[in-house]
Every structure is written in structure tokens, then in C-alpha cells.
Image (cartoon, rainbow, N blue to C red):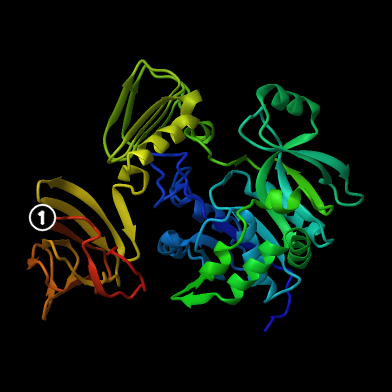
């Protein structure tokens, strides 16, 4: 049943990206929107907090893939945001199906809703200017306009698409019809665009009135809307998540909202905004928005620089030092190091492609692997053994499971562990330990109010994460993950 319409704007946050342009920090299992790249909070958290105002915005609807659902839910909980829904995309189908599915979900509650569609991985420095731009776009949306944000260009950028402004709105200042969308130009065209004053960067952010949006999508992309409608109608509730029907969503064409809608509708409009926007599309982008020292360097972590200029240096785990270098990107993580000229940082995608061809795990997971109950990371490994540090959050519980090929020793470092080991159940505190034989059913749980930390020593003929037989799991997971 539809609820009473309100004047609140409904944020739709898109978090389906796999994010390899910021490798080695960003990986498929933990992409850039889930990382604190531009401050103490993650890009996703900053996006959600930007529209966390009950007087102006409804609770957000998020679209994400299945693998990231627990991380996203936890990050929202950390900043005190209760979403209206976290909808799970069973496969990646670009932005148009994701937006259509969210629109159908929201229209069922409020057919007069105004949607604010936001990627989860952008930086916006001027929040006041952002809110002013949203107000302008919402006013246009209430007149039936399908509005996007054009960013005032700061340089002749070849990595962005552009929007050419058309006729100004008769009464709404700062709102224009869209004359043309332009794909990423070469440097000469980008320079001409900047000189003309008619062009803005295409931000990928939108404000849509939900009913006109669905009407135009149905006219232009009837198959897409039909598939999304079936996906929403066939959606299932999975814990606190909305799981879109897999077969229906997979049948959607994979297409962006620009190509599906904005380039073809007569209702398109643009609000040009100077909001301190950056899509954080490369390590160079982080150098541009970072806090520079007197020699133009941006440093993060344990970094010592001697006679270094205009470099981006990030140390996640170890001390990183540099001497006498210029214009470099240097990024250190627990399991990989990237060094590149700053003007070639975009080419990290070529490194990732090569690693993928070699089936290297460094493209998929960070050294720290996140699970709904907490996380684990490797400490040491060798022939027939490996050591892991396991952290279980309060109330977290691993699945009841067993292994065919490995035994495990657990040593509690901090907190209290409730352990099932075969027919026994025990509570262990700091400096206590237990042994899990091969084939024994076992489970680890944190019944306390503080983080549980333990060291796990595995030994056996095969130590892969797929050697898990799961019997029970409170998170409803399938497969061979803990």
C-alpha cells in the first residue's frame, strides 16, 4: 500500500562498482567506495551523511552487489544511518537497471517522490553548494524535468564526459536544457570546451521525479523496465536486505542511464554546480584533492620524504621512504606496492588486467578479508601451515563448520570466545587456547561487548578457504566462506 506522499527527497545511492582504478588499495571484494580515501570516513559513509537530514531527505535506498552487503550495512550502522532498503543486484547491469529498480521500489510507496541519484564513490567538498544545487534540481524535477548535475570545469579534462548547456529555464535560475552530451574528448576539444564556457563535466548525479522517470524509461527502454518490474515484484527479503529476483534482473540490458534515457529524452535538464566535486578516478585525483606539503607532496601513513616533490605517497602497513624523486605515485599495502609516474596512474588498470590473466588473488581480496562477523588477515604461511589474526565483533558468530584437510589451534588474545568444538562448548579468555581436530564440527562466537581477537594456526595438507563444510550460518550465506 502506498504511503502518503511527502516533500522529502529520496536518495538513491549506487554502490555496485568493483573499483580497480585505485589498486592496490581498492580490490573487487573491497572497492574504493568502502575505503577512507579522502578522510576518516569511507566514501560511502560520506555520501550517505551528505543527505542525512530528516527535514529534507528520506532514508536512502542503496543498490549494491551481494558480496558487499554486510560491509555496507555495517558502515551505515557505524555512522547512525538506517536505510530504507539495501537492494542486492544479482549481476552487474550498469546504472539504468539499478536506477529503474530503485524507482519502482520507491514509487510503490510514494508515486510523487523526487529521487536524488548519487554514486557512492565521489568526493564533494562544498556541501552547502551541493545542497543548493539539489534544491534547484528538485524544483526542476517537480516540473517534470529529468535533471543531472554538470560540474563547472576546472581544466581541460580528457577523462570525463561533457554536457553542453542549451536554453536557460524561464524562471529557475541555473537550470538549462541539455543541448548535447559529449563522450570523453581529446585534449584539443576539451580545451575548446573550457574556453567556450558552454560545457560542464558530466557528474553522473541526477534528480528525477519518479513517475515521469518511469514513464520515459518505459517509452524508451520497455524491455528494461519490464525486467526490473519483475525483479522487484519477485524480490525476497534476506535478513535486512532486499534480494532482487536474479533471473529477471539478469535479463535486463546492461546500459547506463545516460545512454538509456538522458541522451534521448526531451525532458532532460542540467544544473551547473561548483561543489568541489571529484570522482576519485585515479591516484592522481587523490593527489589533487589531498593536503599538500610545501613541496607539493600528499603523504598518508608512516612516510618519510627527502628532497621529494609533487608525489602522492601512501603507506598502509609499513614505513615508506623516498629520496630525490618527482611526480610519482607510491602506494604500499600489506601484500602489494605500486610505483608509477603520476601522469600514468590511470594505467594501473593494465597491471590489474595482467594480474587477472595470471589468476593472482591480489586483484580480488585485500590482505584483510571482511566478513559479516568481523575480519581476518594472514600473518604468516609456509609448507602445510598458515597463521591468521581473526577479529570478531561483539555478537558476531562464525558458521558452524568443519574441515576435511586441516586442523586449527585457536589462541585468544583479547576478549572472550564462546567455542563449539565437537560435542563441547566452552568459554575462553585471554591467553587460553583450544585445538580443533580435522573433521570436528566447530564454531567461534563473541558473546562479549568488546572485540574478540584470536590467533588461528592452521596445519594440514590443504589450507584453502574452500575446504569448509557449513552446517549453520546466522547470516544466511552459502558456499565456502567463513
Residue 83 visible in the current orientation: no
Left or right? Give the position of 225 relative to 423.
Answer: right
Q: Position of residue 387 (x, y in %)?
A: 15, 52
Instruction: Give the labeled residue for mark 1.
Output: 461
In this picture, is 349 found above or below 242?
A: above
Residue 189 falls left or right of residue 283? right
Instruction: Please state, as top left, top right, bottom left or bottom right, where the N terminus lies in the image.
Output: bottom right
Q: Residue at x 9, y 46 (%)?
A: 383
Q: Viewer-proximal residue, 374 or 253?
A: 253
Residue 188 place in picture, x, y as percent? 70, 21
Q: Is residue 185 above or below residue 467?
A: above
Q: Residues within 10 Å of mark 1 (few under 14, many from 20)?
A: few
Q: Quadrant of the C terminus?
A: bottom left
Q: Residue at x 21, y 71 (%)?
A: 401
Q: Which residue is more in the foreground, 318 or 146?
A: 146
Q: Residue furthest bottom?
A: 1
The residue at the point 41 percent across, 49 percent down is: 28
At horizontal 47% and vertical 62% (from top left) the residue drawn is: 76
Q: Nearer the viewer, residue 420 or 76?
A: 420
- In the rendered image, residue 60, in percent from the top left (x then y), is placed at 59, 65
Q: Left of 357 or right of it: where is 17?
A: right
The vertical placement of 346 against 20, above or below, is: above
Relative image position of residue 81 (x, y in whole percent): 51, 65
In this rendering, position of residue 151 left or right of residue 440 = right
Answer with the quarter of the image where residue 306 lies.
top left
Helix or strand or loop: what does disc 1 sit on? Answer: loop
Residue 468 figure quarter: bottom left
Amino acid at each position: 500500500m502506498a504511503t502518503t506522499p511527502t516533500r522529502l527527497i529520496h536518495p538513491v545511492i549506487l554502490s555496485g562498482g568493483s573499483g580497480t582504478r585505485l589498486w592496490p588499495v581498492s580490490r573487487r571484494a573491497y572497492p574504493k567506495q568502502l575505503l577512507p580515501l579522502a578522510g576518516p570516513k569511507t566514501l560511502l559513509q560520506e555520501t550517505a551523511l551528505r543527505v542525512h537530514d530528516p527535514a529534507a531527505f528520506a532514508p536512502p535506498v542503496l543498490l549494491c552487489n551481494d558480496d558487499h552487503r554486510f560491509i555496507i550495512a555495517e558502515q551505515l550502522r557505524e555512522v547512525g544511518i538506517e536505510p530504507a532498503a539495501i537492494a542486492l543486484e544479482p549481476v552487474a547491469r550498469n546504472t539504468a537497471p539499478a536506477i529503474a529498480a530503485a524507482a519502482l521500489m520507491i514509487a510503490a510507496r510514494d508515486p510523487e517522490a523526487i529521487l536524488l541519484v548519487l554514486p557512492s564513490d565521489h568526493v564533494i567538498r562544498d556541501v552547502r553548494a551541493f545542497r543548493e544545487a539539489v534544491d534547484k534540481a528538485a524544483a526542476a524535477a517537480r516540473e517534470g524535468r529529468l535533471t543531472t548535475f554538470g560540474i563547472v570545469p576546472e581544466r581541460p579534462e580528457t577523462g570525463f564526459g561533457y554536457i553542453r548547456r542549451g536554453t536557460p529555464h524561464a524562471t529557475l535560475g541555473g537550470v538549462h536544457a541539455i543541448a548535447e552530451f559529449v563522450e570523453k574528448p581529446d585534449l584539443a576539444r576539451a580545451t575548446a570546451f573550457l574556453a567556450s564556457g558552454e560545457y560542464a563535466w558530466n557528474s553522473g548525479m541526477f534528480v528525477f521525479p519518479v513517475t515521469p522517470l518511469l514513464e520515459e524509461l518505459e517509452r524508451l527502454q520497455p524491455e528494461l523496465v519490464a525486467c526490473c518490474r519483475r525483479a522487484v515484484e519477485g524480490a525476497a527479503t534476506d535478513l535486512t536486505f532486499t534480494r532482487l529476483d536474479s533471473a529477471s534482473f539478469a535479463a535486463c540490458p546492461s546500459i547506463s542511464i545516460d545512454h538509456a534515457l538522458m541522451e534521448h529524452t526531451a525532458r532532460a535538464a542540467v544544473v551547473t554546480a561548483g561543489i568541489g566535486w571529484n570522482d576519485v578516478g585515479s591516484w592522481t585525483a587523490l593527489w589533487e584533492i589531498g593536503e599538500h606539503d610545501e613541496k607539493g607532496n600528499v603523504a598518508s601513513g608512516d612516510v618519510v620524504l627527502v628532497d621529494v616533490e609533487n608525489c602522492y605517497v601512501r603507506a598502509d602497513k609499513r614505513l615508506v621512504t623516498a629520496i630525490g624523486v618527482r611526480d610519482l605515485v607510491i602506494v604500499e599495502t600489506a601484500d602489494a606496492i605500486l610505483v608509477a609516474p603520476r601522469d600514468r596512474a590511470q594505467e594501473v588498470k593494465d597491471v590489474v588486467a595482467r594480474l587477472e590473466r595470471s589468476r593472482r588473488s591480489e586483484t580480488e581480496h585485500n590482505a584483510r578479508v571482511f566478513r559479516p562477523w568481523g575480519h581476518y588477515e594472514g600473518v604468516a604461511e609456509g609448507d602445510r601451515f598458515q597463521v591468521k589474526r581473526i577479529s570478531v565483533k561483539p555478537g558476531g558468530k562464525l558458521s558452524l563448520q568443519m574441515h576435511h584437510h586441516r586442523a586449527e589451534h585457536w589462541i585468544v588474545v583479547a576478549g572472550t570466545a564462546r567455542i563449539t568444538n565437537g560435542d563441547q562448548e566452552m568459554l575462553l579468555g585471554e591467553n587460553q587456547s583450544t585445538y580443533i581436530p580435522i573433521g570436528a564440527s566447530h564454531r567461534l562466537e563473541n558473546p562479549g561487548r568488546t572485540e574478540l581477537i584470536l590467533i588461528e594456526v592452521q596445519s594440514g595438507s590443504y589450507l584453502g578457504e574452500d575446504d569448509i563444510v557449513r552446517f549453520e550460518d546466522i547470516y544466511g550465506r552459502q558456499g565456502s566462506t567463513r
